[in-house]
Image (tube, grey):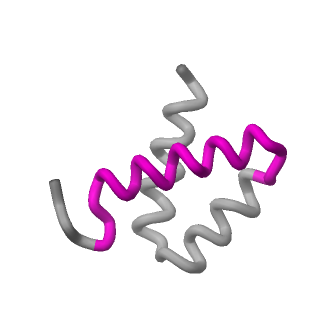
């Protein structure tokens, strides 16, 4: 497992928290926008891909 800023473990944990926030009524678009703003485009894109995959389950 990577120890870098964008390790898979960190992306998965963030994605799970992201899904919880959306379930509680926080706007997906607002969350992904702020994620990209504070964590960068690469991290945001990875989170978005995972979150959308989780929604299909």
Point 54% across, 42% down: residue: 51
48 sits left or right of 5 in the view: right
State the image coordinates of residue 12 (x, y, percent, origin top left). Answer: 40, 47
- Residue 1 versus residue 46: which sits nearer the camera? 1
Point 41% across, 67% down: residue: 42
Point 59% across, 78% down: residue: 37
35 sits left or right of 23 in the view: left
Check if residue 7 falls in the magenta segment: yes
Point 66% across, 42% down: residue: 20
Q: Is residue 6 above or below residue 14?
A: below
State the image coordinates of residue 9 (x, y, percent, origin top left). Answer: 31, 52
* Stretch of the chain drawn in magenta: 5-27
Instruction: Examine the residues drawn in magenta and state their main secondary structure.
Output: helix
* Farthest left residue in view: 1
Q: Is residue 44 above or below residue 26?
A: below
State the image coordinates of residue 3 (x, y, percent, origin top left). Answer: 19, 67
* Farthest top residue in view: 57
State the image coordinates of residue 7 (x, y, percent, origin top left). Answer: 27, 60
């Amino acid at each position: 497992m990577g120890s870098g800023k964008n390790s898979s473990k960190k992306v998965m944990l963030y994605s799970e928290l992201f899904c919880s926030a959306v379930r509680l009524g926080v706007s997906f678009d607002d969350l992904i926008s702020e994620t990209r703003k504070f964590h960068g485009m690469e991290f945001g894109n990875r989170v978005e891909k995972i979150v959308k995959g989780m929604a299909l389950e």
